[in-house]
Image (cartoon, rainbow, N blue to C red):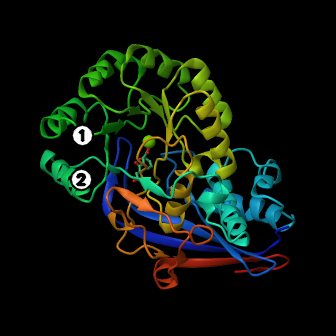
């Protein structure tokens, strides 16, 4: 039985090493909360909010995750005794959606639960590998030369596939350029909903470039139009922003809206839901992969743990900490060797928090003690 005595929200602001541009926005830094849970025996579990500071990716923001955690989720958590992390689904059911807020707490409970069992988190969730193949996602660049340099640098570091961002203004020229230089490279693209159903004929031209998949060409709720497109395309469609719940996965599979799904812990509310979606996809022969959210170390390790499940069939996004951050908040940082991240056998997420770095980037700390609140 777990009782959460104290919840500490570490509000952290971290500048990215390089700006990350997609069809909607440019991200230059990450505003996030590291969630630290302390149970009745003094064991600690860690989670991370993955929302951005504006609602361009989903409707949540860093600030909405704080409000939902503080006003709804933490009071529920502190009034309960938890037998298994799956209990949080029922505990949080009075809060509609807000998957990223729920995931930040739920993943911390999973970390704590694994530590209580003295087992690595990936083992506790049923992972089948401790080495995860990784790929690199490269944002839109100002020039072709910059793009090719970034790609070559990622390939030199061993990344096993490249994902590029596309939009109607930045697509066929880029694909032509990249295929001239790298005819056989495992390559995929992500549109973050930049296209409309009127663009189907244009999107059919993507079939010439042997892409592993096209991620999220249309708007999140357009399951029907994605199905129309998938019928006409040879290239598999991957749904990312469309998949927040098991019901979304069922809809996508029933309508043939995609052939691949990207599962991100934050987007689906944590491990319990992510595992359900993973299992449902496996049973329906839909492979999945683990997309990234420009996570700091805690979120990165949680995502990598998820990617150890069997039906994660493509290189994952969360790679080396040093691709994103000047210094990461975990010790040791995540590194990539021969195109893989090796997970540690240590309990839980398998690394310590680097408090020197976290405190350097921390702008506020909020403590929720079981009965009293300190700020
Ligand atoms: O974390 C990474 O390495 C890649 C991040 C990434 O590609 C994304 C993060 C968040 C929103 C998007 O721009 C994009 C995605 O949609 O997958
Ligand atoms: Mg995406």
Is 328 placed above or below 355 here?
above
| Image quarter hosting the C terminus | bottom right
113 or 326: nearer the eye?
A: 113
Mark 1 vs 2, N-terminal side:
2
Is 202 placed above or below 342 here?
above
> Going 31% across and 18% down the picture, which residue do you hit?
204
Q: Which residue is mark 2?
A: 155
Q: Residue 99: horizontal and vertical position, in percent?
A: 65, 49
**Residue 51 visible in image:** no
Q: Quadrant of residue 58?
A: top right
| Image quarter hosting the N terminus | bottom right
> Going 57% across and 36% down the picture, which residue do you hit?
243
Is 53 placed above or below 325 here?
above
In the visual, does 89 lie left or right of 155? Answer: right
In the visual, does 366 lie left or right of 338? Answer: right
In the visual, does 37 lie left or right of 127? Answer: right
**Residue 259 visible in image:** yes
Q: Which residue is mark 1?
A: 185
Is 101 placed above or below 169 here?
below
Q: Quick one: label 1, few (<14), some, or many (20+) residues within 10 Å?
A: some
342 or 156: nearer the eye?
A: 342
């Amino acid at each position: 039985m777990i009782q959460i005595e104290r919840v500490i929200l570490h509000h952290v602001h971290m500048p990215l090493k390089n700006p990350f541009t997609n069809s909607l926005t440019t991200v230059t830094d990450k505003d996030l909360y590291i969630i630290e849970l302390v149970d009745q025996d003094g064991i600690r579990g860690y989670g991370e909010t993955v929302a951005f500071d504006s609602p361009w990716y989903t409707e949540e923001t860093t600030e909405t995750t704080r409000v939902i955690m503080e006003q709804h989720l933490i009071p529920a958590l502190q009034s309960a005794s938890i037998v298994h992390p799956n209990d949080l689904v029922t505990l949080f059911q009075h809060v509609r959606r807000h998957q990223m807020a729920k995931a930040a707490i739920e993943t911390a409970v999973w970390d704590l639960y694994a530590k209580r069992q003295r087992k690595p988190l990936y083992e506790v969730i049923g992972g089948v590998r401790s080495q995860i193949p990784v790929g690199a996602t490269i944002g839109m660049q100002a020039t072709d030369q910059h793009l090719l340099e970034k790609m070559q640098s990622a390939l030199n570091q061993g990344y096993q596939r490249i994902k590029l961002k596309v939009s109607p203004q930045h697509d066929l020229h880029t694909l032509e350029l990249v295929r001239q230089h790298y005819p056989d490279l495992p390559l995929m693209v992500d549109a973050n909903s930049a296209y409309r159903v009127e663009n189907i004929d244009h999107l059919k031209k993507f079939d010439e470039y042997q892409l592993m998949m096209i991620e999220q060409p249309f708007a999140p709720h357009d399951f029907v139009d994605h199905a129309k497109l998938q019928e006409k395309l040879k290239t598999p469609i991957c749904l990312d922003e469309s998949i927040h719940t098991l019901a979304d996965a069922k809809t996508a599979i029933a309508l043939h809206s995609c052939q691949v799904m990207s599962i991100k812990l934050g987007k689906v509310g944590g491990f319990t839901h992510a595992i359900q979606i993973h299992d449902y996809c496996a049973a329906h022969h839909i492979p999945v992969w683990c997309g990234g959210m420009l996570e700091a170390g805690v979120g990165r390790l949680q995502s990598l743990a998820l990617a150890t499940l069997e039906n994660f069939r493509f290189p994952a996004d969360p790679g080396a900490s040093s691709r994103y951050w000047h210094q990461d908040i975990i010790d040791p940082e995540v590194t990539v060797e021969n195109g893989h991240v090796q997970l540690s056998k240590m309990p839980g997420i398998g690394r310590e928090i680097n408090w020197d770095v976290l405190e350097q980037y921390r702008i506020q700390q909020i403590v929720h003690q079981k009965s009293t609140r300190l700020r």
